[in-house]
Structures are given as structure tokens and as C-alpha cells.
Amino acid sequence: VSLLEQKRKVVSSSIDVPHARKSEEEVDMDKVTAAMVLTSLSTSPLVRSPPVKMGEGLNGSWKDGGFMPSSYSSSGYWSWSAPSDHSNPSTPSPPLSADSFKPFRAGSLSGPPDDALDEQDAGSLLFDEPIPRKRKNSMKVMFKCLWKNCGKVLSTAAGIQRHIRTVHLGRNCDSECSDGEEDFYYTEIKLNTDSVADGLSSLSPVSPSVLSPPPSFEHRKPDTSGSTAGSRNESSSSTPLSRSAPSTLYLVHADHAYQATAPVNIPCTSTACSTPSTHTAGFTPSTSCSISWQSPPVTFTGTPASPTHGRTQGFSEQRSQTITVLSSPPRAAGSLRKSRGEGKKCRKVYGMENRDMWCTACRWKKACQRFVD
DNA sequence: ACTGCCGGGGC
DNA sequence: GCCCCGGCAGT
């Protein structure tokens, strides 16, 4: 038994807790930059146009990457994508392995518009749409402390980690001695500073009919409006987004499903959304909402529909919450059992004999956290 | 039969 | 809260 225990500890620490991310980031930066240069020199002009857009259509890719139990060190896993993919220093190191999303997010933050590209990117270049690309950059990522009664919001992951470490965890040592626990206590909030709508409308020849479907819309009923988002984000945004800040899109990531985090709701809970009031409204929601159950958008880059996906990167995170909400309105809320996810889960991957390697959720026979699909 | 995981426990 | 597991439903 003790052996198992020990094993478990070892495992979890090696898997979930990235150490010393800070310094490595810095160092990597240089390496990456250098690599970048080399890469760009050796690649065809086509491939190397920089405009990052990490989200665009490659959800699948980083998602998968995140799943790897050892995502921290599994750079090899990314081998299929262009080398420059490593340009996001923080991507590999981020938070926990179980959490498949942060990598991307953190990347978009600290790994500034550096030239991250991959095959998809290259592919989408064929369509050469500078506009949608740019848009990515208008997303602001903030980090919010989830500690009870502390709504502190900082703009950097490091900042929020330090905050949590010192204020809540009572550790004084600097990031070096962190075991990564802080990751569990903050979440990322994305806000879109520019109008998503205009981008979309200009981008995609969507017919009005597409806009109108109320169901996809997130605006809540007047009465309940903002109750979720508003009340939860007191610190950063106490305003009902749909009204006062129509162009601001909040995407919150409830990363650690089984941790203390009370899910931060995304605007798209709507049952209401009866009127497609503004086109602005019509869009955002469908974006963040529909995505979750959509099939991999990857191939679609360039079509009217897909840009949507790429753009609002929040999606997968809220899946768990969103999905239920989404599915319920249309159908009889009752007996709808989420269709079984098809990916391999801990149980299958590690087998019964390695039960201690499963994610907690799997161990508890709950929806797998590690291999979310 | 196997697998994922919901719902409902026990502590 | 954490943890377990009966049992259902999809494969």
C-alpha cells in the first residue's frame, strides 16, 4: 500500500506540477527567437508569415497536446506541427496536465504575437485573410483569483500566481519553490476588446437567418441578465455584459473541474436570447456556445462558419457547463445523457492495474478530466 | 463484456 | 468536501 501511495505521489507531482516555469520561459524565449529566425530563413515564404493566431482552427492540436499526461515534457508530441510551434515558451510548461486548455491561453498571453504557426496556419494562409488573423490579438487575457472572497484580477499569470502563493497559500519563497498549486486557484478570463461582430459580419456572408436563431444566443433574460457573469466577476466586470459592454466578450475558463472552482458562467447560458437584437449579439454567443459540440473545425478554416470557432477561443473550457445548458433548452431536459465520449480515457489508457495513474475524476468514476473530448 | 460516468451514497 | 461504487447506457 505504501508503495502505491508513494507511487501516486510521484506520479502526480511529475505529471501535474510544472516546476520553475518562470526562468525557463525566459530562456526559452531566446532560444525560440533564435529558432524562429532560423526557421524563417529555411522555410518557404509562404509558411513563415507570422501573424499568430493560435486559436484558429487548431483547437484540436493543442487540445490534444494538453491531454498528454506528460504534456509538460512531451514536446515530441507536437512534432507534427511546425517547429516554430515551440515558440510559445509557456505552452509546454503551463499549469497542469489535466488541464488541456491553459497551455493555449497562457501562450497567448506571455508568448506575445510571436510567430507561432503550424500546418493549419499555413493552410489557412491559402485564404489569406489578414483581417481575421489580427483579431486574435485583440483578446485580452486576465487572470482571476478564485480564492474565496478574493476576486483579484491580474494581467499576468505570474502575477496571479505570486498573489495566490503569498496571500493565500502563505508561501514566501518565490516561484522556484512553488509546486504549481497556485494553478488551481486562478482562472483565466478573456476579454475581447474589439467588436467581434463586425469582424464576423465582414468576414462571413452569413445570412440573417443564421443570426436569428435565438437559442444560440447568450443574452439572458432581462431580469436575470448578467446574474451569472455579472455577479461572479464582481471585481473585473460587474456590469451585465450584454448591455453595457456589448462588444466585450468574456470567456472564462473553469479549468479545474474537480477543484474548488465554482464554474464561472459564460454568457451563453441563454435560454432567453429571444431577440437577435443587434448583430453583435447574434454572433458572439453562437460562437462560444456551439463550438463545444461541434466537430473539429480545423479543416474549415476560411469558410464562413469556422472563423467563428477560431476566434473565440474560449470554448472547450466551458464545455462541461455549457454543454448541458445548451442541450437542454431545445430538447426535453430530462433523460438526455451525454453521449459517451469517444476518446480513450484514463481507464483504458492506463488500465485497471494502473488505477493510480488515472485522473481523479476517473478514479471516482466521474467524467474524465484528463482526456476530455 | 467492456467502458464511461451519473447519481447516490459513506466518511 | 473527498472518495467510492451501483448501475445505466453506449460500444
Image (cartoon, coloured by chain):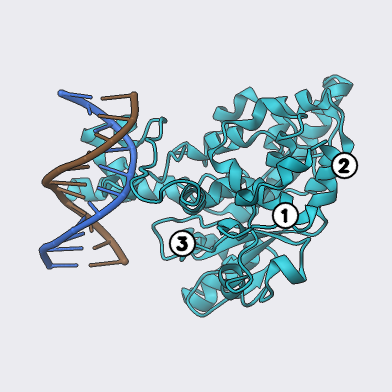
Chain colours: A cyan, B blue, C brown
Q: Give the percent coordinates (x, y) of residue A169.
A: 46, 73
Chain under disc 1: A
Q: CA distance from mark 3 to mark 1?
A: 42 Å
Query: Do pointers 1 and 2 mark residues of a single chain?
Result: yes
Q: Earlier in the sequence, mark 3 or mark 1?
A: 3
Q: Residue at x 36, y 49 (%)?
A: A12
- For mark 2, give the secondary structure: helix
Give the x, y percent position of residue A165: 52, 70
Q: Earlier in the sequence, mark 1 or mark 2?
A: 2
Judge from the rendering whether residue A38 lies leftward or rightward of residue A181; answer left or right.
right
**Position of A309 relative to A44 (above/below):** below
Residue A205 shown left or right of residue A65 in the figure: right
Q: Relative to A105, say whether A350 is above or below.
A: above
Q: Look at the image and tell me whether residue A10 can be seen.
A: no
Q: Chain of mark 3?
A: A
Q: Mark number for residue A236?
A: none
* Real-space CA distance between mark 2 and mark 3, rounded to the nearest whole angstrom: 43 Å
Other residues around mark 2 within 10 Å, as few (<14) / some (14–19) / many (≥20):
few
Q: Which residue is mark 3?
A: A181
Q: Which mark is residue A202?
A: 2
**Measured from the top left, where is residue A51 in percent x and y?**
83, 38
Given the image, what chain letter belongs to the residue carrying mark 2?
Answer: A
